[in-house]
Amino acid sequence: MSDRQHTKREWWLTLSAGFAAFGAYFCMYAFRKPFAAATYAGAAELGGLDFKVALVIAQVLGYALSKFIGIKIISELRPGLRTGFFIGLMVSAELALVGFGLVGDHWSAVVMLFLNGLPLGMIWGIVFSYLEGRRTTEILSAMLCVSFIVSSGTVKSVGAWIMQNVLTGPQMQGMFWMPALTGALFFIPLLGFVYWLHKLPLPTTEDVVARGKRTPMSKASRRKMLRRLGPGLVGVVLYYVLVTAFRDVRDNFAAELWTALGYGDAPAVFTLAELPIAVLTLGTLVLGYFIKNNRLALRYYHALIVSSTLLVICSTLAFSTGGLDGAHWMVIVGLGLYLGYVPLNAIYFDRLIGAFGGMATAGFLIYVADASGYAGSVIVLLLKSLGGLDVSWLRFFVGLAYVSGTFGLLFSSFSWWAFERQLAATDEATFVPQFTSTNLQ
C-alpha cells in the first residue's frame, strides 16, 4: 500500500470512528436530558425541595455514584466486554424512564431518575475507550465532545416538541412520559452506532509509539499514577468540580434561564444557542491535533482552560452591567464553559499520559475528575435549594459564573504551574516511553 493510500485509509477510519462515537453519545443524551425540558410546575414539593430540583439532584446523584464506580470498572474494562456492557446500561436507563412515566407525580419519581442516572455515568468512559491512544485522538475527541454540546439542547427540543404535539392529554401526564418516549425514539439508532464502534480496529503500532499503550489498570497502577501526578492533578480536579457544577446548572435549568431571558416560548433556542459553541470548541480541539509533541500540547490545553475562565468572568461582567444582552451572554458564557470543560472530558488526560509516559488509560483519570465534579454539582444544587438562597435561577447562575470563573482561574493556573515544575524536574528519557516490536504484543 502506498503512503498516499495509507493516509487516505487512515483519514477514512478517523471519520468513521468519530461519527460512530458522536452518534452513540448523542443518542445517550436522549435517555438523560429530555426530562429537563419540562418545568413540572404544579407537582408537589419533596422534602422541602422543588419537584424539578429534586429530580435533577436524584439523577446527578446516580450519575455521580456511577462515576465513582467507574473509576474501577472503566479502568479495568477489557475491549471484548465493552459492547454488551454498553447496551445493557442503556436498556437499564430506558426502563427507569418507563418507571418514571408510570409513577408520575409521586416521590418514587425521584428514585426512578436516580436509577436512570446510575447506568448512564459510565457511558462516556466506554465510548472514549474506543478512541483513546490514537494519533488522531484529538480529531476523534472533538467529534465526540461536540455531541454532548449539541445533543443536550437537541433532545430537550425534541422533548418540548413531543409535549406540545404528541402527548396532547393532561399536561402533567405528558411531562412524565415524555422522557421515556424520547429515549425510545433514539434506541434503534443507538444500537447502530454501538455496533459501528464495536467494528473499529484497535490502535496501530504507530499509534502506540506516538501516544503510549493503553491497557487495563490494576489497583496498584492506579495508585502509582495518582501519586506521580500529585498536586497538578489536585488543581485540575478542583477546577473541574467548579466547571461541572456550573455546566450542570446551565444545562439542567436551561428552560428556566431562557424563560427569564425572554425566550420561554421558543423550543429551538435550546439547540440554536449551542451550535456556535460546538463549532468553535471543535475548532480548538482540531488545532490541538497539529501539535505532535505531548508537552507542547499539554501547554496548549492549559492555556485554553485558563483563557476559558477569563471569558466566563468578562462576559458575565458585561451582561451584569448591561453591555451584553441575555441571548449573546448565554452563548459566550457557554463557550467559555465548554472551552475548559471539553478538553478535560477527553484529550487533556490523553495528552497528560503521553507527556508523563507509562501504560495507563485516560478513562481512569477522566473518571477521577468526573466523580469529584458531579459530587460538587450535587452540593451546589443542595446549597441553592436548602441553603437559604432564595434567588431566581438566573441570578444564581450569574453568581455562580463569577465564583467558578474566579476560583477556576486560580486552580487551573496552579495546576499548570505544578505540572510544568514537575515535568521540568523530570529527565526526558524517564518520561518518554520506549516501545519496541516485542513489548507491543
Image (tube, rainbow, N blue to C red):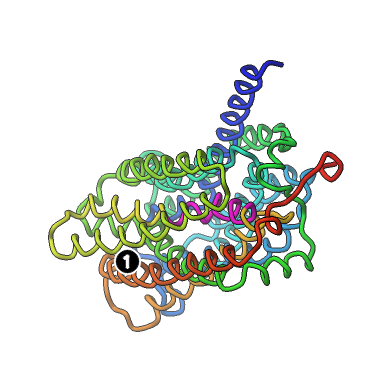
For the record, the magenta segment spans 340-354
Say whether residue 92 is visible: yes
Give the quarter of the figure containing the N terminus.
top right
The residue indicated by pointer 1 is 401
Decide whether residue 6 is among the magenta residues.
Answer: no
Q: Quadrant of residue 19?
A: top right
Residue 23, horizontal then vertical, whole percent? 55, 37
Give the quarter of the figure containing the C terminus.
top right
Residue at left 87%, top 42%? Answer: 438
Q: Quadrant of residue 352?
A: bottom right
- Measured along the vertical axis of the image, is residue 158 above or below residue 420? above
Residue 105, horizontal then vertical, whole percent? 46, 64
Of the residues shown, which amino acid type is indicated by label 1?
Ala
**Residue farthest to the left?**
322
Image-based side of 151 in relation to 271, left or right = right
Residue at left 84%, top 45%? Answer: 439
Foreground: 84 or 166? Answer: 84
Foreground: 174 or 421? Answer: 421
Image-based side of 430 in relation to 136, left or right = right
Residue 340, horizontal then vertical, whole percent? 43, 56
**What type of secondary structure mainly makes up the magenta span?**
helix
Residue at left 68%, top 65%? Answer: 69
- Measured along the vertical axis of the image, is residue 155 above or below residue 233? above
Residue at left 33%, top 41%? Answer: 276
